């Protein structure tokens, strides 16, 4: 579901209560563990953590007015979603996450390229997500992002 909002608080106020509690806990986990430099905002109709223009003035290549997106959380129709660009762009992080996930949750990992879908909101591995958040600094992500851009531009 897409929620029209200008702030994370406004976004959360629109989400059904049972999902709001889960998203608030997920948001707090992310805020407590993301390295300094990422900023919370609303982008693409989701709560998003970005590399702000003050750190990466070029912004997102698709729309340079938008800060570089890194991680997002959202309440979708049938699941809570965690979008993490490190899972998409850094193979070692993806492999680590796929190997660690079954150690934290008994349900099968449901994921796309950067999206982890949590259909059962009682099976969100907050401790694993906290560790995932700590793995990549804004500087690490900028380096990875720029390497990926060079590949695209060739």
Image (cartoon, rainbow, N blue to C red):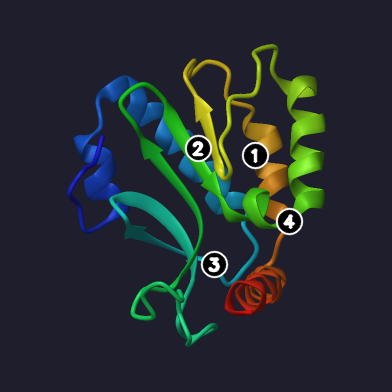
**Local crowd at mark 1 within 10 Å, few (<14), some, or many (≥20)?**
some
Question: Considering the image in quadrants, where does the N terminus appear?
Answer: top left
**In this rendering, is residue 48 above or below 147?**
above
| Structural distance between the alpha carbons of marks 3 and 1 | 16 Å
Report the mark closest to the observer, 4 or 2: 4
Q: Earlier in the sequence, mark 3 or mark 1?
A: 3
Mark 1 or 4, nearer chain start = 4
Tell me the number on the disc at residue 26.
Answer: 2
Picture quadrant of residue 126: top right
Quarter of the image where the C terminus is located: bottom right
Q: Secondary structure at mark 2?
A: helix
Residue 90, label in figure: 4
The 10 Å Cα crowd at callout 3, few under 14, some 14 to 19, many 20 or more, is many
Q: Residue furthest front?
A: 154
x and y, in percent, of residue 102 in the image: 76, 21
- Nearer the observer: mark 1 or 4; the answer is 4
Residue 38, numbered circle = 3
């Amino acid at each position: 579901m897409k929620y029209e909002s200008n702030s994370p608080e406004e976004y959360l106020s629109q989400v059904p209560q049972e999902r709001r509690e889960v998203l608030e806990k997920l948001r707090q986990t992310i805020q407590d563990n993301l390295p300094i430099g990422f900023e919370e905002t609303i982008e693409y109709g989701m709560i998003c953590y970005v590399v702000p223009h003050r750190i990466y003035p070029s912004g997102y290549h698709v729309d340079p007015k938008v800060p570089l997106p890194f991680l997002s959380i959202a309440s979708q129709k049938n699941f809570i979603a965690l979008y993490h660009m490190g899972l998409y762009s850094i193979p070692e992080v993806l492999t680590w996450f796929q190997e660690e996930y079954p150690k934290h949750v008994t349900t099968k990992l449901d994921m796309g390229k950067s999206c982890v879908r949590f259909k059962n909101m009682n099976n969100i591995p907050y401790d694993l997500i906290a560790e995932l958040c700590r793995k990549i600094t804004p500087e690490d992500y900028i380096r990875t992002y720029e390497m990926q851009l060079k590949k695209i531009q060739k």
